[in-house]
Amino acid sequence: MIRIKKYSEKSLFNTYILIALDQLTFTGAEIFKNILIDFCVLIFNFSFILFQMNSQHINLLNNNIKELIWDAIKISFRNPSFLLFAIKTWYWQNKALRRRLAWEAKGQHVPPFLIVSLTHQCNLNCKGCYSREQKRKEGKEMTPETFKSLLKEATELGVTFILLAGGEPLLRKDLLDITKEFPHIIFPMFTNGLLINADWIMQFKKQKNVLPIISIEGLEQETDLRRGQGVFKQLEKTVQFIKQKSVFYGLSFTVTRKNAALLLDTDFVEPLINKGSRIFFFIEYIPVKEGTASLVLTKEQRQELNSTLAFFRKDFPGLFIAFPGDEAALGGCLASGRGFVHISPEGLVEPCPFAPYSDSELGKYSLKDAINSPFLKKIREQHELLQEHNGGCALWENKELVKTLLMETSSI
């Protein structure tokens, strides 16, 4: 392995460069690697001096990202072609950072993340699915033009990551035709994986910034119980094909009181690493479906989740992310524009996927104005009321308060 100096701050994309450099094997490569690393570190340190100008919770967010970065250093892409993408992305990331700081100086906070639910449609009917259980009044979904406009404005504001969700995102056949126009944005895409075929995989290889994140619930019994008979075996074949094609991908788990012990077992995670997964999302179950509060993690399980993921980060070459568990280090809930906002399939700008309330619709409002809407500002101002919760989601547990804030601001 190449030498890696432990500096105070680095970005996820800088990690990508180091990993890609590690694949270089030509004569004199070691000297070249170290020279380029030292050069990059100078730029990194300069960039993150600017971070200190930001607000307290953004500094906390940055510190948390720093911990994730050291985890990402362990990831081996085994694909030298990734180097060019990493260098380009590093440049775009620092450019986006400067844009966010410029807006911050003007009094406009810009969250680094967006969560965009592209469609209500899905080819599965998973038990306890929050998207279905919310029983939203479904309207006309965003047109390709509206989606493109959103991504263009996000770029202008300096948004770095846009998480794609659904429904099932791959039911939007125009998806990758649109994302290819925005190679500077990282798109983790949460999918049930059943629609992934050779055509999709070839597109993923071309668009390295689109990262398929496949959802499972554990092993065959747990996955099929929630997602349907035969789903697990089909996903095993899909994952094997993805690994063969050297596509960077990850896995997502909904962590409940029943499957937590399995998901946090080394014997469960290690084979998944061997199958090529390099990102792991552990998402705490939110009891959107009435009568399922017994599935919410206990306080002890939540503590075990955080401590076990810390162990995994040290011992496995993967990126391990708990949601919303990692928010504890960030001063609480990151929704409502503190760290992210949610865009519904209709283009409604909402606090988060588990708080389906909005006073702003894209097309009528710009993304910038929607982030600064009276409703979202009121939630941010009331943030201390949303820090304490029993697990899962503070906004969901305080949904009556959230509804009240929406009514108050709608009458202004």
Image (cartoon, rainbow, N blue to C red):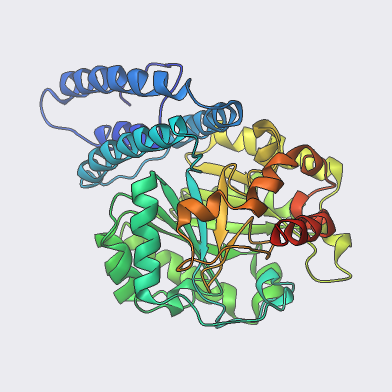
Instruction: Identify the residue at horizontal 64%, vertical 52% (top origin).
Output: 374
Estimate the x, y position of residue 358 in percent, counting from the top left. Answer: 64, 63
Q: In which quadrant will I find the C terminus? A: bottom right
Please state the total of marks drawn on the protein image: 0
Q: Is residue 346 above or below residue 35?
A: below
Q: Residue 295 location in percent, x, y?
A: 83, 60
Whether 24 is drawn above or below 410: the answer is above
Q: Is residue 193 left or right of residue 91?
A: right
Instruction: Name which residue lies at 58% across and 47% down.
Output: 337
- Would you identify the image quadrant in which residue 380 lies? top right
Q: Position of residue 152 (x, y in %)?
A: 33, 57
Q: Is residue 202 visible?
A: yes
Residue 393 appears in the picture as rendered: no
- Residue at the spot 67% in from the left edge and 39% down from the top edge: 327
* Nearest to the observer: residue 152 or residue 313: 152
At horizontal 64% and vertical 39% (from top left) the residue drawn is 309
Residue 39 % position (x, y): 23, 19
Screen quadrant of the N terminus: top left
